[in-house]
Amino acid sequence: MTYPQPDLPPLACFTTEYPPNTFPALPVREGEHVFAWFARFHDQAAADAYLADRRGSEPVLVLAPTARSLLR
């Protein structure tokens, strides 16, 4: 498991929760083991440089804020 670089502090970290789903209206995938972290880059160039360093390692899913997001 790879954690963010020290100079790129995470905004949030999430891990898999294993208790049974007690709310059937919200389907949950079982049997998955996940660690997800979210970070914000200063600009697109910094994000591109970080991703270039990560090529060949664990998969990276890149999310972008929507037009109305406060993260823009």
Image (spheres, rainbow, N blue to C red):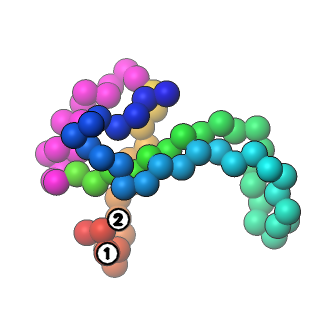
Within the magenta stretch, is there residue 48?
A: yes
Q: Nearer the viewer, mark 2 or mark 1?
A: 1
Residue drawn at x 24%, y 30% as measured from the top left: 52
Q: What is the magenta range?
A: 42-57
Eyeballing the image, is 67 above or below 29? Answer: below
**Residue at the spot 65% in from the left edge and 45% down from the top edge:** 16
- Is residue 35 highlighted in magenta? no
| Image point (44%, 46%), residue name | 37
Of marks 2 and 1, which one's residue comes earlier in the chain? Answer: 2
Majority SS type along the magenta span = helix
- Tell me whether the residue at label 2 lies in contact with that at label 1, contact meaning CB atoms closer than 8 angstroms: yes
- Residue 28 horizontal/vertical position (percent): 75, 55
Residue 65's disc number: 2
Q: Is residue 72 above or below residue 7?
A: below
Q: Tell me the distance, in whole angstroms, between the alpha carbons under discs 2 and 1.
A: 8 Å
Q: Up-down: is 22 above or below 15? A: below
Q: In x, y percent, where is residue 67? A: 31, 74
- State the residue position of label 1: 70
Question: On the image, which quarter does residue 61 sit in?
Answer: top left
| Quadrant holding the C terminus | bottom left
Give the residue type that dot 2 points to: Pro
Q: Residue at x 34, y 78 (%)?
A: 68
